[in-house]
């Protein structure tokens, strides 16, 4: 009887240890992801995800990406399985992934759900604040078995972000129109991570209260908002701000405070957003000097 009791205890301890060995991480959709072991064959289904995976120390485990995954340079050599909107499922399955990291609003649900039903674990990634980036790195590090490198990268990001916040916490607010595209005219609301970068720099998004994350707006609405600064992400020479010169009544045009910044470092919620935010802060600091004259 004693031997049986001992055996049951040992079995219980073994089950407990196995349960503790599993990796449990909650993604940005609030879903709990459970892995029996660190992922070894990961497919990234968004460019910002690719950057996050490499920064978290998982570059060697990434076996496939989508188009425009051009950073870091090593990612350009990896097989591509489509783009943000359309995935080549056969090519993806041929890579035998044990984890998919996807962009929650960028990848078509009609393609993702069948993959989930095949038993491939999915982690949804969509940081909406700069502070969420280091948290994402830590969670990905857990899934990849690279926690040490992920925590180091997360700590460095957090320290630099805190320094940037302190630098501009007393800065005079500047009203900003952020232009994503000009035809049609797209902007971003206050829930997008770019608006969080603006807040760090002391900027105020003039369309922060719109309900849609990436809404279209009219030129008349922009004129009525009368931003002090206009900023556009550089999309390879497209979607610039030159067309606003026809509206000299705008404060930003009158003071020639129209700036174009590199889109990838501002639109992709990954570690490089720190550099994009620094550039954004520098432009707003420049604008304050002009506006106070």
Image (spheres, grey):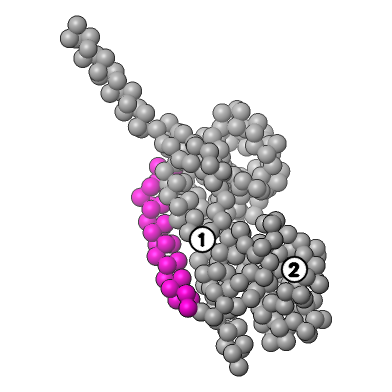
- Residue furthest bottom in the image: 293
In the displayed structure, would residue 20 be above or below residue 106?
above
Magenta stretch in the rendered image: 144-170
Task: Kindly state the secondary structure of the residue where label 2 is placed.
Answer: loop
Give the foreground label among 2 and 1: 1
Residue 32 visible in image: yes
**What residue is drawn where x is 38% and y is 47%?**
147
Question: Which image quadrant for residue 156?
Answer: bottom left
Q: Assess disc 1: are there few (<14), some (14-19) or many (≥20) residues with their C-alpha within 10 Å of its C-alpha.
A: many
Q: Residue placed farthest to the top in the image? A: 1
Residue 232, x across and y down, in percent: 68, 71
Q: Could you tell whether 9 is left or right of 214 in the image?
A: left
Report which residue position mark 1 lands on. 130
Between 205 and 72, which is closer to the camera in this rendering?
205
State the residue position of label 2. Answer: 239
Residue at 70% over, 68% down: 179
Q: Is residue 255 magenta?
A: no
Which mark is drawn over residue 83? none
């Amino acid at each position: 009887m004693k031997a049986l009791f001992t055996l049951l205890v040992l079995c219980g301890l073994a089950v407990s240890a196995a349960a503790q060995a599993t990796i449990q991480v909650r993604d940005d959709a609030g879903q709990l992801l459970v892995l029996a072991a660190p992922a070894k064959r990961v497919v990234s289904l968004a460019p910002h995800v690719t950057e996050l995976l490499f920064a978290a120390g998982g570059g060697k485990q990434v076996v496939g990406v989508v188009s425009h995954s051009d950073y870091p340079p090593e990612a350009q050599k990896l097989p591509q399985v489509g783009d943000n909107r359309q995935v080549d499922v056969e090519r993806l399955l041929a890579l035998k992934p044990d984890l998919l990291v996807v962009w929650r609003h960028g990848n078509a649900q009609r393609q993702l759900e069948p993959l989930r039903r095949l038993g491939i674990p999915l982690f949804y990634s969509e940081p909406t604040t700069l502070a969420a980036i280091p948290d994402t790195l830590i969670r990905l590090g857990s899934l990849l078995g690279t926690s040490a490198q992920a925590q180091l990268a997360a700590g460095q990001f957090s320290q630099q972000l805190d320094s940037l916040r302190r630098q501009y916490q007393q800065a005079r607010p500047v009203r900003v129109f952020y232009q994503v595209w000009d035809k049609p005219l797209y902007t971003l609301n206050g829930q997008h991570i770019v608006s969080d970068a603006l807040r760090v720099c002391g900027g105020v998004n003039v369309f922060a209260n719109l309900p849609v994350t990436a809404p279209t707006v009219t030129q008349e609405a922009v004129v009525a908002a009368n931003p002090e600064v206009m900023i556009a992400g550089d999309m390879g020479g497209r979607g610039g701000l030159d067309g606003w010169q026809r509206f000299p009544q705008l404060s930003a045009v009158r003071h020639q405070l129209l700036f174009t910044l590199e889109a990838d470092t501002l639109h992709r919620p990954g570690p490089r957003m720190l550099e994009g935010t620094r550039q954004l802060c520098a432009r707003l600091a420049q604008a304050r000097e002009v506006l106070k004259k």
